[in-house]
Image (spheres, rainbow, N blue to C red):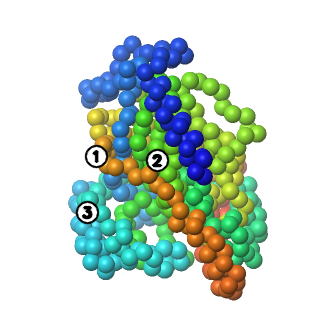
Amino acid sequence: MKHHRLALVGAMAAVVALASTPMASQAPRAEADTTAAGWTSPQTAWGDPDLQGIWRGLQRINFQRPPALKGREFLTDEEVAKLEQASARRKVRQLQGKQENWGDRNQPNYNSVVSYSPERTRYAKRTSAVVDPPDGILPAWTLEQVRYYEEREAATLGRGEADWVVDRPTAERCIPVVPKPILGFWGMALSGRSKGIPTNPTVNALGAGFSNGASGGGPYRIVQGQGYVVILEEEAGIGGGVGVSRVIPLDGRPALSKTFQHWMGAARGHWDGNTLVVVTTNIRYPGPIITSHGGNYPGTGETLTFTERLTRLDADTIEYRYTVDDPKVYVRPYTVMHELTRDDAYKVSKIICHEGHDDTPSALSAGRFDEETAIDNANETRLEREERFEEMKAEAIEAAKQLNSSK
């Protein structure tokens, strides 16, 4: 891990050095594009749109549209104000240590003071970060994916939550992956519902935050060099704790052979007007064991194309969209949108992932010390998955029927 990080630091230094070196493969643009509002996008010295800086997702939003807001794309100003007032009250309780954080199996974990921030919580007016499909809900699984998930359940059955390191999530093991396609609740998501899974209403209330662990909210530090963009993600792992630097070439090089696969995939970038487009393929997620503590992508990732689009709207705002397109998993692609705000005063931390990694021997030892409890815990999460899986299986069957009837 240390050698991997040193390589990334060296690669970033090389990119910065490239900023002053001409490259024949990229001709400078003749002039800057201008937005409809009359704002002129800044450019680098070599003519690319300038996205450099520190960008944060400061607006909280539901990942999927809750059933109570079906058919509504936006909240009213009054509803947003009520959410922010409720958040302010929660912050008071957090600072007093009176509101706990709740984790897996709805058990209290860290004291709320640990996660307290004096920053005012802001809420987006959009009712879901999912903007396509238009209903704000993730598309159904394919029948092929349903069969694969049944195979994963069979492979996981009978295992404790710490039989071996593969039973622990990648973030806990300090392994960076492409995080945004990984949804909460073991990769299944809950469509904005909490059926079958107990929740603490004061913590998991509507609008309380980015749901399902797929925020896309950064913080990001973007550094550009001629022919390259580097995106430093402070926390790229599901559950946090894993920082990563992505070096993205813009020189038109071809995609890698499908024989090469990586947990972070292979990224290729290009400019579409003022929009940076980053396409990541050759992704391979860990499997088939379903980890009890999240960090699961429903499929293998082999047929996944992950496309990001970053467009600077004004001096302090980037529109960040990403599309998950995996024909083996979903019946159609879905797109998520977040607004990123420039905050160059924010200090991007150097994430030194060690907590779960260092505790892995203890987790495995605890499993050996009390195998019965480890099995019981794993079975409890399996039962939680079971109810949602049956719902998703029914959704997949219905989607297949609709597809066949439309042919």
Name the residue that disc number 2 marks. Answer: 233
- Indicate which disc, 2 or 1, sits on the residue closer to the N terminus: 2
Q: Name the residue under label 3.
A: 118
The image quarter in which residue 394 lies: bottom right
Residue at the (62%, 25%) spot, across then down: 253
Q: Which residue is drawn at 48% across and 25% down?
A: 18
151 shown above or below 109:
above
Query: Which quadrant of the figure contains the C terminus?
Result: top right
Residue drawn where x is 42% and y is 35% of the image: 223
Q: Callout 2 environment at 10 Å: few (<14), some (14 to 19), or many (20+)?
A: many
> Gap between marks 3 and 2, in whole Å?
22 Å
Pointer 3 or 2: first along the chain? 3
- Residue 345: assigned label: 1
> Can you give x and y, in whole percent of width and height, for residue 40 in the image?
29, 25
Q: Is residue 210 visible?
A: yes
Which image quadrant for residue 170? bottom right
Residue type for callout 3: Pro
